[in-house]
């Protein structure tokens, strides 16, 4: 191992890509990181400004000393538990590069199911008739879902066929969402609002066609005992109360006055929460149809509530 400068993190293996990956992997494995090789490759690749495929094809590539010192700092941060997405400053999600930092949750693979369901719902409504489709995402966080929707329907929004709004209780999260929208050049296509659940006045008097919700759904006990990357993410975006459903319970209770007659809600939920959500919907004094979508682990991950 190369000698570190005083006060700097110890340099890692190297100087070749293969040596750096081996050295970083050993450090992360020793720190108890569950995916040491993968994380080492992501960090080393990032230090070269390349992806993992390039890294595998260029094992003898050498990193200059300044970048090696920076890499050592990144590995030290990862060894302490900080998520890769916060260290690199982005998360690859739905083929998009989502800017990430501690202002909001890191986009999850499971949330791609929510985005895909929303896109499918909007597509069906756009081809059904010529009326503008009103869509609102509550709890937008980094803005990932709203961004995916805006990019897919950029033309429809520009023509006034679709109106898209996104809100969050956290002003800091909305700042991050704005950065993501601006980076992808859709900032002017999404109305942003800060407030509690359906409090912001972004819904037309005629009501919503689609409400998208990705609210905190961990129980308080789960959030407190989370460990790993969750310890670095904002607690307010994780803790859903005693049973994980505090915010979703309030949202469902408010639905009858905010949705159009055939309006739909798509909400991401936690493992084992589907039956409780069905019971909450059944208590509404309106007719509804409830279905769920399962993720790749066969967990009921997205609940669809339709007024009928």
Image (spheres, rainbow, N blue to C red):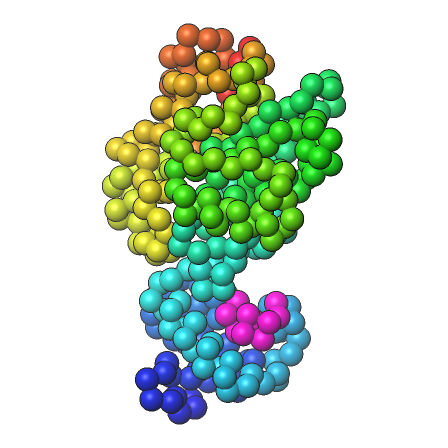
Image quadrant containing the C terminus: top right
Residue 266 part of the magenta-drawn span: no
Counting from the top left corner in percent of width and height, residue 222 is at 29, 43
Residue under the point 51% across and 46% down: 177
Residue under the point 26% across and 46% down: 224
Residue 19 in the image: above or below residue 300: below
Residue 47 part of the magenta-drawn span: yes
Image quadrant containing the N terminus: bottom left
Secondary structure that dominates the magenta span: helix
Q: Where is residue 79, by image quadrant?
A: bottom left
Q: Where is residue 36, by image quadrant?
A: bottom left
One can see residue 111 in this view: yes
Q: Is residue 286 left or right of residue 131?
A: left
Q: Is residue 259 left or right of residue 55?
A: left
One can see residue 37 in this view: no
Point out the stretch of residues depicted in magenta: 42-51
Residue under the point 73% across and 19% down: 130
Residue under the point 47% across and 35% down: 193
Q: Where is residue 92, by image quadrant?
A: bottom right
Counting from the top left corner in percent of width and height, residue 89 is at 49, 61
How many numbered circles are shown? 0
Residue 156 in the image: above or below residue 31: above
Q: Nearer the viewer, residue 187 or 17?
A: 187
């Amino acid at each position: 191992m190369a000698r570190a400068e005083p006060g700097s993190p110890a340099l890692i293996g190297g100087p070749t890509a293969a040596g750096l990956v081996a050295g970083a992997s050993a450090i992360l494995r020793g720190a108890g990181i569950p995916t040491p090789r993968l994380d080492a490759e992501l960090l080393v690749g990032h230090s070269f400004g390349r992806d993992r495929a390039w890294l595998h094809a260029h094992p003898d590539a050498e990193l200059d000393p300044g970048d090696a010192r920076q890499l050592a700092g990144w590995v030290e941060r990862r060894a302490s538990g900080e998520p890769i997405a916060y260290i690199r400053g982005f998360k690859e999600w739905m083929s998009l590069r989502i800017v990430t930092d501690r202002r909001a949750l890191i986009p999850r693979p499971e949330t791609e199911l929510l985005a895909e369901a929303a896109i499918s719902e909007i597509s069906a409504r756009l081809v059904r008739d010529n009326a503008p489709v009103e869509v609102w995402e509550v709890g937008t966080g980094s803005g990932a879902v709203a961004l995916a929707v805006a990019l897919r329907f950029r033309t429809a929004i520009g023509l006034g066929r679709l109106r898209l709004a996104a809100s969050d209780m956290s002003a800091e999260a909305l700042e991050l969402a704005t950065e993501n929208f601006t980076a992808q050049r859709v900032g002017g296509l999404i109305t942003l609002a800060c407030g509690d659940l359906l409090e912001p006045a972004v819904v037309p008097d005629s009501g919503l066609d689609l409400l998208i919700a990705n609210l905190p759904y961990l129980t308080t006990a789960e959030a407190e005992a989370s460990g790993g990357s969750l310890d670095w993410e904002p607690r307010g975006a994780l803790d859903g109360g005693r049973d994980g459903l505090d915010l979703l319970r309030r949202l469902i209770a408010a639905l009858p006055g905010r949705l159009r007659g055939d309006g739909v809600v798509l909400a991401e939920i936690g493992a084992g929460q589907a039956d409780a959500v069905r019971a909450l919907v059944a208590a509404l004094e309106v007719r509804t149809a409830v279905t769920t979508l399962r993720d790749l682990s066969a967990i009921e991950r997205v609940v669809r509530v339709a007024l009928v």
